């Protein structure tokens, strides 16, 4: 059974091998309700639960105060180690903490 037209062009040899372009084509071929089917917003209550588990808050805040992207990545890693959060959740929590530090 041949692939449907939107997907056939993704896997043909004449297409660009770039994964990003292929993903963009696939996303464009999907109807609107299915584009972000599994993408759920992160609830602030969940981040509060993770923040309660955080043991190295001072170390993370010190990394964020430097303002370097490399230190932000280190802060995300520490947050994940302490809380068990996913990468997406840890990134959202670190962004939230960073915003709070900048406004304080």
Image (cartoon, rainbow, N blue to C red):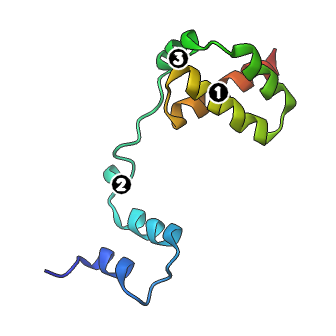
In the image, residue 82 lies at what x, y percent?
57, 20
N-terminal label among 3 and 2: 2
How far is the residue under mark 2 from the one under mark 1? Answer: 36 Å
Mark 1 is surrounded, within 10 Å at the Cα level, by few (under 14), some (14 to 19) or many (20 or more) other residues, namely some
Q: Residue at x 73, y 35 (%)?
A: 72
Q: Residue at x 43, y 90 (%)?
A: 14
Q: Is 52 drawn above or below residue 86 in the view shown?
A: above
N-terminal label among 2 and 1: 2
Judging by the rendered image, the residue that carries numbered circle 1 is: 78
In the picture, the disc for residue 32 is 2
Q: Residue at x 84, y 34 (%)?
A: 67
How far is the residue under mark 3 from the one under mark 2? Answer: 32 Å
Which-is-in-front pick, marks 2 and 1?
A: 1
Judging by the rendered image, the residue that carries numbered circle 3 is: 50
N-terminal label among 1 and 3: 3
In the image, residue 96 lies at what x, y percent?
65, 24
Mark 2 residue element: helix
In the displayed orientation, state which residue is furthest to the front.
81
In the picture, the disc for residue 12 is none
Mark 1 residue element: helix
């Amino acid at each position: 059974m041949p692939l449907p037209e939107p997907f056939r062009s993704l896997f043909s040899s004449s297409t660009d091998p770039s994964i990003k372009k292929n993903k963009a084509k696939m996303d464009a071929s999907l109807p609107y309700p299915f584009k972000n089917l599994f993408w759920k917003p992160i609830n602030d209550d969940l981040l509060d639960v993770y923040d309660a588990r955080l043991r190295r808050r001072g170390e993370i805040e010190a990394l964020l105060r430097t303002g370097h992207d490399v230190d932000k990545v280190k802060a995300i890693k520490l947050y994940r180690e302490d809380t068990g959060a996913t990468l997406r959740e840890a990134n959202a929590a670190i962004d939230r903490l960073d915003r709070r530090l900048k406004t304080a």
